Every structure is written in C-alpha cells, then in structure tokens.
Image (cartoon, rainbow, N blue to C red):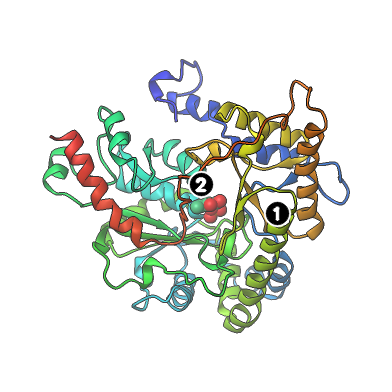
Amino acid sequence: MESLNNVGKSNVLSKRGMRIKNDSTILEIGLQKCLDNGYSDSNPKGIINAGTSENTLSHDIVAEKLSQVESPYLDDPDILKYKDFTGMRTFKNTLCSFLTKYANAHEQLNPDNMVILNGCGSCVAALSIVLCDPGDVLLIPSPFYNAINTMTGRIPLVNLVHVDIGCQVKCIFRELQNDILAIQNNNSPIQRADNKHKLHVILDEIYMFTVFDEKTQFTSVLSLDDLPDPDRTHFIWGFSKDFCMSSLRCGAIYTWNKQVVSALGGVAYWFSVPTAIQFTVDRLLADEEWVADTYLPTNRKRLKDAHEVMSKGLTQLGIPHRVRSAGLYIWADFRKFVSPLTFEAELEMFYELIDAGVYIPAGQCFYCQEPGWFRIIFALSKETQRLGICTHVYGGIDAERNRPTTGDCVVTRHVKEYVYAMEEQECNRVNRPLIAALPQCVQSFDEEIFK
Ligand SMILES: Cc1ncc(COP(=O)(O)O)c(C=O)c1O
C-alpha cells in the first residue's frame, strides 16, 4: 500500500482518507463490475462472477433453515437495546461448543476468550489495531487474500511483508530494513532482538469446513495442545465461506490472551454484529442435528461435485490447474496465454476476460510471485454458470487463437513451459509449517537488521 507521505494533499481529506479514496484493489474493481452488470437469468449477457470467494452452492438449504428459526424480534424485544459489543453471551456459548466439537479443540473453548465481530476481515483489522502500532509490520505467507492488505493497511496503518515461506525471507528483510519497526508485537526493536521468537501468530481458518476430499484432514490450531506460545496465538473463524453467509457479516476471534480480549473490547463497537444477526445465527447453529446431518455433509458433497465439474471443464480446455481438496477456488495456469509473461500482460488478460464476460482475478491480486496464474471460484450455484465460465474463458481465448494477427489478442502467444516453483500456500489450512517457520523468520530478521 502506498506510503502516507506520497498520497498528495487534499483540502477535505486526511492523508489516510486520501489513501483510502485512491486505493481500489483489483478485487474491488472486479466485484463492482459484477454488481453493476452481473450475470443472472434475466441478464444472461452480464458478467459471471467467478472471482469473489463466495460459496453459493448451499444457499438454498441455509435460506430454508434461516426461514425456520425463531424470529429474534418477535421473541425478544430486548434485542433492540445496546448489548455487549463483543458479542452476546448465548451466542458465544453456542459458538464455543460448535468450534470445540468441529475444530476438534484440545480443551473446551471458553466464551471469555471469544470476541465476535462482523466478519473475519474485521477480526484481522481489530487484531492489527491492538497488536500493532501504525507503521509496524505483519508477516504474511503469499499468495494471500488481498483484502488482508486493506484490512491491516487502511485503518490500522500496518504494513504487510509477504513471506514466501522457505525461500525469500532474507531478501525481503534486506529490502525492508529501513521500514521495519516491529513484527507483530509491541516490544521495541531492541527488546525484540534480545527476545527472539516472541511473535504473535494469527491463524485465519475461515475455510475450515470447505474440505471436501475425504482423505484430507483439517487441523485447526485449536486442536493443538503443544502450541509454542498460546498467549500469542490468535484464531479467527467466520460464517462467510463455511456457512454461505458472506452478507450476514459474522466472525469471531478466539485468543487465550486476556489482555488482547480486553483491548478488543475497546474496538468492538466499530466492528460489532447486530444482535438480531447473532440471535439468528445462534439458533441456526443450535440445531446440532441440522448442522451435522444436513448442512455439513450436503455442502461438502456439493463442493466436491462443483470442484470436479470445474476441474474437468478446465482439463477439456487444456488449461492446467491445481487440483484442490478444500476451498472454494482453483488456481488455473494461464501462463501459456500470457505473453510476454509479465504482470502487465497478466493484468491485460484479466480485463480482456472481464470484457469476455467473466471475472476471474489474476494472481497478482493475491501477490503471486509469478505471472500467469488466475484464481477461479468453483463454488457457484448452477452448473450452467460453471460451464458458462468455461465457455467464456474458452470463447475469450479461442477467439484469439483464431485471430492470430489481432493486435490485442490473448492467445497469439506461444506456449511456454515453466516449472511452478512457488508452492501454493493453503493460507487457511493450519499450519504447523507456518508456525515452525516463523521463529526462523525472526532469526533471519535479527541477523539482517541487528547484526
Ligand atoms: C482468507 C480470508 N480471510 C478473511 C476473509 C474475509 O471474510 P469475511 O467475509 O468474514 O470478512 C476472506 C474472504 O474472502 C478470506 O478469503
């Protein structure tokens, strides 16, 4: 994110306000285009949104269930009053029981350690505010969800350092050595040099229940009983992906650190979840039978099927891709279509695909280190939409293949073979390697900065 010193002057806005006004990400642009002119039965020429990470596959069963739960307004007029901004006690109890069971927690979760906020994005922002000072640095494995940048940058004024775990730590630190003031903790640099490895670790497990392959086991940080530093370990989870409810804006932080809970209480006002939503989601989770026997297995099966359809479609189009066992998206390898293989050409292709009727974000939106990769959401409700994507992508590409002399073409470009050197980070599947790697990161930091 641009430095505050470079944002220019305004008679109206603060520097922060100026930077926010001018900072549209590609994901925001893509979403806006889909909101303005989205594909639907009544607008078949609209843009198909295969870029926003949403699970629409099980909207029908969630909507049906929501229509059956008790109405908060009728049953509880008290709901209209101010409440604890960190979340209703009853909802915390329910969510703690739910996560204890499904995250296989090694101990019964304690509602006193939980703060409920309006989405995982807000959880990241709130943790950035209470763990970092403006100008501090958070390390994040890349590629990663781009909006984390905006969550940590726009209001908390915290910088992200992208860490391609295992290979680039040293050079990142070398480049940034004049900028780094802290790594995700509040000690002064000198204290940190003496006190190695005292990193806070934030585990964003927002995709916990999207594992659709029976052979894949999800390991939540809540299940680990041998954490290196529980007091500096903070867990995030939310309903946007796993329960198809991105618009209800509901997520939670679980932390063993009482100081962090207390500080979060001071910012929860800005990020709180309306009581009616908490009440409704609480009732939905409280139906344990529905969750266990209907929702989770049905959603898992639908994700698996949708993934298969998308994967087969891409294979038929000759587009290599990373087969997944979890998540809502597939990384597709469009490198042979991007020529020269640069981020500029990749961006050009991103806009060409939007013009062809499909929004698929380019890897640079997620700070992929190599151009040519695109992230395609497969958790779309209708098979026709998924096929539509293939048709649109194919249409965009094939049209170019048939018009090799056209100046603005996508695929007059020759195929190149590359080794995909970057291991795809499964940001939300946690993550012993990450925890294990962080002390090494700090050590490299210390060696580089404080030698
Ligand atoms: C890894 C990750 N974290 C957080 C979020 C934000 O989710 P929410 O809707 O709960 O704010 C997303 C959304 O795409 C995500 O992919």
The reply to whether residue 241 is in sight is yes
Residue that numbered label 2 is attached to: 145
Q: How far apart are the alpha carbons under marks 2 and 1?
A: 25 Å
Task: Relative to 435, say whether 143 is above or below.
Answer: above
Task: Give the crowd class for mark 1: few <14, some 14-19, many >=20 residues within 10 Å.
Answer: few
Residue at the spot 46% in from the left edge and 15% down from the top edge: 9
The reply to whether residue 199 is in sight is no
Residue type, numbered disc 1: Thr
Residue at the spot 62% in from the left edge and 70% down from the top edge: 72
Task: Give the crowd class for mark 2: few <14, some 14-19, many >=20 residues within 10 Å.
Answer: some
Residue that numbered label 1 is attached to: 315
Q: Quarter of the image holding residue 379? A: bottom right
User: SS of the residue at dot 1?
Assistant: helix
In the image, the residue with mark 2 has its CB under 8 Å from the nearest atom of ligand 1: yes
- The earlier-in-sequence mark between 2 and 1 is 2
Q: Is residue 139 left or right of residue 420?
A: left
Task: Relative to 91, say whether 126 is above or below.
Answer: above
Residue 306, position as x, y percentages in the image: 70, 63
Q: Is residue 17 left or right of residue 57?
A: left
Mark 2 against mark 1, which lies toward the viewer? 1
Q: Is residue 246 left or right of residue 125?
A: right
In the image, the residue with mark 1 has its CB under 8 Å from the nearest atom of ligand 1: no
Residue type, numbered disc 2: Tyr
> Which quadrant holds the C terminus?
top left
Residue at the spot 36% in from the left edge and 51% down from the top edge: 266
Between 308 and 185, the one lying in front of the other is 308
Residue at the spot 24% in from the left edge and 50% down from the top edge: 440
